Amino acid sequence: MVLLYAIALAGLNLLVGYGGQISLGHGAFFAVGAYTAAVMLDRFTIGHLATLPVAAAGCFLLGLGFGVPALRLRGLYLALVTLAFAVFLPPLLKRFEQVTGGSMGLTVAKPQPPAWTGLAEDQWLYFLTLAVAAVALLVIRNLLRSRVGRALLAIRENESAAEVMGVKLSFYKTLAFAWSAMFAGVAGCLYTWVIGFVSPDSFSINLSITLLAGLVVGGLASVYGPLLGAAFVMYVPNVAQDISSAAPGVVFGLLIIVVMYLAPTGLAGLAGRAGHTVRRRVERLRRTRRRPEPVPPAEPPDSPPPAPQPLATPPTTRKG
């Protein structure tokens, strides 16, 4: 689960962390990917891997559609539009009961491991999720290091200056929304594989808020921030659940406040500063060890050396 949430957070990081656009609707893109896979597996006799590109392509096109209002809206206005999508989708899924299963949801089979692998079902699911996550995170990393990533950073810092430099604002803003939605859909597809069940209640507005909170806690515009944020949103509620049934919400909220107060750049920024401090101290110790030890002054002799004897002068002879 951490890996699939890391994919969703990495896609959201592409839009929010690097593009500077706020989205509260990525839980809905996650749901679209999950339901795409579930409906295909429920209605057609196909393999699980075939659902992945369909879910990715569908969410990419949906993201393109939402990228259009992103050209005219920004800040809180864009956040409200995406929030409306996240609120609107669960009732819509309940409406089309014949396709989506309504409030009861859909139950699908999990991918079974091939006989030659000798793996159990959970192990096979783990390796499948790990492989997809590795490819997705590698694509996102390369994307951020390309012209697209540099253009998004320029747009985030100053749109007017970026436009003067020749960056096409409409193209890159729409593309960022599409890519971000696509990776959320991929994560949703993996969710269907892992859980084997989808229902509208699983994709409420809380999911969108959790994804955004996890990204902020992990660290915006950071390579490792999505991984840390995914671990945070998965493990903290589970550990708190063991304490009390009412503890997850309280502990989750308090930890978010503490992290934002102590580490405004997120856990990734905190880890980076800690690593920099450790490296600086190690380098200081190395320089101290390399410094030559001072040579102690020579001790004075116990007795003074004998005084030099005067040179003997030859006798002079007088003539006459």
Image (cartoon, grey):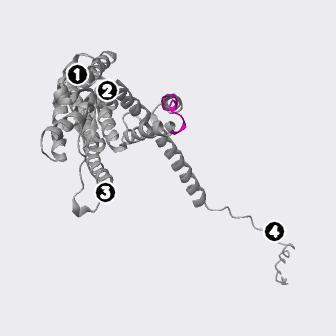
Whichever of labels 3 and 1 marks the residue nearer the N terminus, that label is 1
Q: Which residue is mark 4?
A: 300
Q: Amino acid at mark 4?
A: Pro
Residue 182's spot in the image, x, y percent?
22, 35
Q: Amino acid at mark 1?
A: Leu
The answer to whether the residue labelled 4 contacts the one labelled 2, judged by CB atoms less than 8 Å apart, is no
- Kindly state the secondary structure of the residue where label 1 is placed: helix
Whichever of labels 4 and 2 marks the residue nearer the N terminus, that label is 2
- Classify mark 4: residues with Cα within 10 Å, few (<14), some (14-19) or many (20+): few
Q: Residue at x 22, y 61 (%)?
A: 115
Which numbered dot is residue 92?
1
- Kindly state the secondary structure of the residue where label 2 is placed: helix
Q: Amino acid at mark 3?
A: Ala
Give the mark toward the camera: 3 or 2. Answer: 3
Give the mark toward the camera: 4 or 1. Answer: 1
Which numbered dot is residue 120?
3
User: For the residues marked 4 and 3, what is the alpha-carbon distance in whole angstroms?
Assistant: 82 Å
Query: Which segment is the magenta one?
Result: 242-250
- Classify mark 1: residues with Cα within 10 Å, few (<14), some (14-19) or many (20+): few
Q: Which residue is mark 2?
A: 156
- Classify mark 2: residues with Cα within 10 Å, few (<14), some (14-19) or many (20+): some
